[in-house]
Amino acid sequence: MTGAAKAVATVFGVGYSPIAPGTVGSIFGCLIVYIISLFVEINPVVLLAAIALAYAIGFWATKQLETLWPHDDNRIVIDEALGIFVSLLFLPYSPKLLICALVIFRIFDIFKPLGIRRIDNFHSGHAVMFDDILAGIYTNIVLQIIFRWGMVTL
């Protein structure tokens, strides 16, 4: 069971990247969205399903690894993919917006402003996932503003 938990938490090994595993995990989240977009329209239903699935399996995996790895270990990147999915919710899909989401999400995830660090300090499987959900919500708000003001065109 631990092998499956590690595979999920690291998004099939992406989290083992020796350089910036969180960024690599976020890029992988973008890649997942892009691949999905090749087969179906990216819309709120698709993203909500991806969010629910990533949260459920991410929470399960982090609970399984609690005694093996430190809290919110750098190898755990399923939460970064989850944050990317949240970042894009209720926005029209475009590769430009996907890249903007990646950059803005990483800024929020790295610096952890506006209560994100407080959530990260709770040591639970939920906290591992929720700090990236909050970073994704903040990213989404910024993207909604810049998209609605025409600062990013599709």
Image (cartoon, helix red, strand yellow):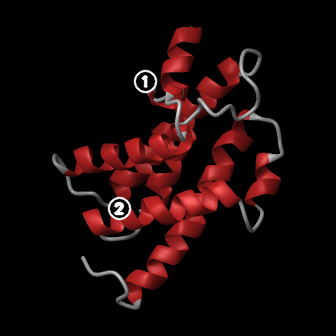
Q: Position of residue 14 (x, y in %)?
A: 45, 30
Residue at 16% x, 46% y: name it.
Answer: 39
Residue 117 falls left or right of residue 130: right
Q: Name the one closer to the observer, 64 or 101.
A: 101
Q: Name the one closer to the observer, 22 or 148.
A: 22
Q: Position of residue 96 (x, y in %)?
A: 29, 68
Circle 1 SS class: loop
Residue 127 falls left or right of residue 4: right
**Amino acid type of the residue tagged 1 in the rendering:** Phe
**Amino acid type of the residue tagged 2 in the rendering:** Leu
Please state, as top left, top right, bottom left or bottom right, where the C terminus lies in the image.
bottom left
From the image, tell me which residue sits under label 2.
Answer: 98
Circle 2 SS class: helix
How many residues crowd around disc 2 within 10 Å: few (fewer than 14), some, or many (20 or more)?
A: many
Residue 132 falls left or right of residue 84: right
Residue 114 falls left or right of residue 50: right
Q: Residue furthest front?
A: 19
- Which mark is on residue 12? 1
Instruction: Check the image and report above or below for 30 versus 146.
Output: above
Residue 130 seen from this side: yes
Residue 89 seen from this side: no
Q: Quadrant of residue 45?
A: bottom left
Instruction: Check the image and report above or below for 133 versus 5.
Output: below
Q: Earlier in the sequence, mark 1 or mark 2?
A: 1
Residue at 83% x, 43% y: name it.
Answer: 122
* Cα separation between marks 1 and 2: 22 Å
Q: Name the one closer to the observer, 73 or 50.
A: 73
Instruction: Check the image and report above or below for 79 versus 141.
Output: above
Q: Position of residue 23 (x, y in %)?
A: 50, 46
